[in-house]
Amino acid sequence: MRILAISLDLDDTLWPIQPVIHAAEQHLDAWLKHHHAAVAAAWPIPALRALRERIAVERPDIAHDFTAQRKLMLEQAFAACGIGRDPVEPAFEVFYAARNRVDCYPDVGPALSALAARLPLASISNGNADLQRIGLRAHFRHTICARQIGMAKPAPAIFHAACARLGIAPEHMLHVGDDPALDIEGARAAGLRTAWLNRSAAAWSDAAPGIMPPDLHIRDLAELVRWIEHHT
Ligand SMILES: [Mg+2]
């Protein structure tokens, strides 16, 4: 295969996402306790989480947009306590600032520098991370997220949007991600080549029963750099 560009997933590919969301929920909770104690009392973290999950089910029209889901969650939580929309944006900003304080896996910084020196990179994410705030934006020609495109992975449209922005045919784009269904099956269906980032050393057949294996299987991004150096 001839690779001319690389697209990368973000959450759980460049950093672990669960601790970040957990910390962001804690920051929002602390802010609510300080500024809106009644809302914090009525909506402890598990209750807000359940509200967001309910919104995700009830509003398929914003399934691809975690920012819209979280703002609606806040709006409904404040409304239930008789408070209007005014605190929604400041509360979201507290969550969002913490959501962008990520700890990248140690291989990420050097690998992105090495890859970006050879090939154009794009990010493709269903999440709402801000690479500018995180400090990684300079490595990427384009940042594609489900929120802008109006559709989430595994929809082919989000992968094709990345190919179009880079001016690269899908068969020359290598998509790298951790999720067998969203990243590997989704990218393959869109005509891209695929690299499964498998940091936990799982067997493909266990992680993705019934899904065709990826073109490449890598343990970290340093391994991807070595492959790219030998094949481009
Ligand atoms: Mg991911």
Image (cartoon, grey):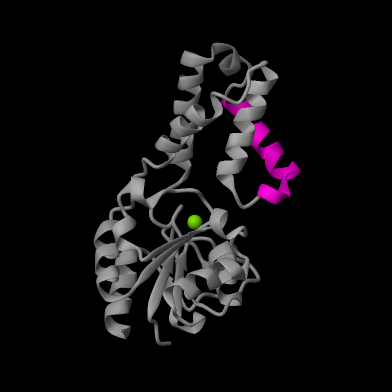
Expressed as whole percent of the image width and height from the top left, the position of residue 93 reads 46, 33
Residue 232 drawn above or below residue 138: below
Residue 1 at what x, y percent from top left?
Answer: 43, 87
Is there any visible trace of residue 210 in the rendered image? Answer: yes
Side (left or right) of 119 relative to 181: left
Q: Is residue 46 magenta?
A: yes
Q: Residue at x 64, y 35 (%)?
A: 72
The quadrant holding residue 121 is bottom left
Extreme-right residue of the structure: 58
Viewer can see residue 206: no
Point out residue 125 in the picture as x, y percentages from the top left corner. Answer: 50, 57
Q: Magenta span covers which residues?
A: 45-62
* Magenta run includes residue 163: no
- The residue at 28%/64% (across/down) is 111
User: x%, y% of residue 12?
Assistant: 45, 53
Q: Is residue 170 left or right of residue 122?
A: right
Nearer-the-camera pick, 112 or 149: 149
Q: Nearer the viewer, residue 148 or 55?
A: 148
The secondary structure making up most of the magenta span is: helix
- Name the residue: 32% across, 77% down: 227
Q: Residue at x 33, y 56 (%)?
A: 137
Location of the C terminus (image quadrant): bottom left
User: Which residue occupies the foreground of this view, 163 or 17?
Assistant: 163
